[in-house]
Image: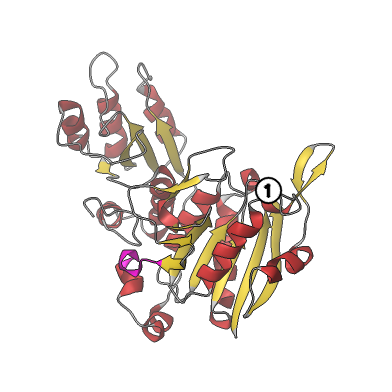
Amino acid sequence: MKKILVLNTGGTLSSIKSEHGLVPGIRSGDMMEELRMISKNLQLETEDFCSVDSSNFFPEDWAALAVRIAEVCREYHGIVVIHGTDTLAYTSSMLSFMLRGIPIPVVVTGSQLSIAHPVADALENCRGAVHMAASGCPGVFVAFNRKIILGCRASKVRTMSFDAFESINYPNIGEISSLGLHIRREYLPPACRDKTPEQLRESFQPRFAYSDRAFLLKLYPGIAPEIMDHLVQAGYRGVYIEGFGLGDMPFLKHNFVEAVHRAVERGVTVLAGSQCLYEGTNLTVYETGLKALSAGVIEARDMTAEAALTKLMWVLGQTNDPQKIRRYLEQNLTGERVQGW
């Protein structure tokens, strides 16, 4: 019988009503009766990692969660992480990098209604997560609304609907229908797809280091270029910029490109993405993009904002060498950057 560990971190799924609004309050042991209903033929164990709203889940918590998963991953066939939806995609993205090459499935899930609510989506999402965790497909995934999404491709796109998450610029890894759970193994990252479980177990070397000196900046018409100088002075080592359209940046009147160049010259890594959710960047089309490339930016291509920021944080934790940083960011490490699939 396959053993699955359910790690509870809180969020809406485990929330209860209080005088201060909904707050996490249901412990993992209290969910066992419901979880057993959707996990027949599997041996479930639960553990409370923490109990917080995901708005209060921070980078140090990502690292601690990754450490805990790495500690116990050889004892289980799969791990489910219950998490609040608001920052779930950031957590699943960072886990994808920190736990790159993990030999078992790690599946992050949550819900839009508490498991205590009679019409909640919680049990259905847990069902998908538990059975994906038992699938034997290695890697980090998100299970939500009968979809299985690669962890570094998930993004929350709706605030209230049960269909809250989508896989951005990449096919779903799996879907649940009347035919059951269908997994598209051809879309697993090569590091997971092309190795046997034994090879993965032998080669798995988690890396938990990260830098919190990364900043996410969204451009808008008229943004003061001096913001880049302020970020440099504040000690930020990397900036992920959501540019216009294909990733373009202004250079007339308010010369933002020149400010980016100054930052790059001072050792700051600048990763350039798009404010558009789909289809990614191409900085070779317009003058506004080519000037950004000349200033030294690195293209995010088709990465989600969550993956781009967490990858930047993770890479800055691995090395201080500008050339190595660039190589890391331009590589497809775990399925986060595959423009042209």
- Tell me, yes or no, whether the highlighted magenta stretch contains residue 57: no
Which residue, given by chain and number where applicable, does mark 1 sit on? 12
Identify the image quadrant of the C terminus. bottom left
Residue furthest front in the image: 178
For label 1, the SS is: helix
Q: Position of residue 27 (x, y in %)?
A: 77, 61
Number of numbered discs on residues: 1
Is 281 above or below relative to 36?
above
Image vertical order of residue 133 relative to residue 316, above or below: below
Residue type (three-letter) at the residue carrying disc 1 = Thr
Can see residue 99? Answer: no
- Whether residue 332 sits left or right of residue 109 in the image: it is left
Residue drawn at x 68%, y 52% as measured from the top left:
13
**Would residue 46 be seen by someone viewing this image from the given angle?**
yes
Left or right, 216 with respect to 2, comes to left
Q: Residue at x 41, y 43 (%)?
A: 305
Observer-nearest of 187 and 175: 175
Q: Could you tell me which quadrant the N terminus lies in?
A: bottom right
Asked whether residue 186 is drawn in magenta, I would say yes
Residue 129 x, y percent position in the rendering? 55, 64
For the point 77% across and 37% down, the residue is 21
Q: Residue furthest top?
A: 253
Residue 166: x %, y % from top left: 44, 47
Instruction: Determine whether, in the image, residue 74 is placed left or right of residue 284.
Output: right
**Could you classify mark 1 by the number of other residues whose Cα lies within 10 Å: few (under 14), some (14-19), or many (20 or more)?**
many
Who's the residue at 46% across and 67% down the image? 179
Check the image and tell me how it is coloured: secondary structure
Q: Which residues are magenta?
A: 183-189
**Picture quadrant of residue 96:** bottom left
In the displayed structure, would residue 280 be above or below residue 229? below
Q: Position of residue 335 (x, y in %)?
A: 33, 59
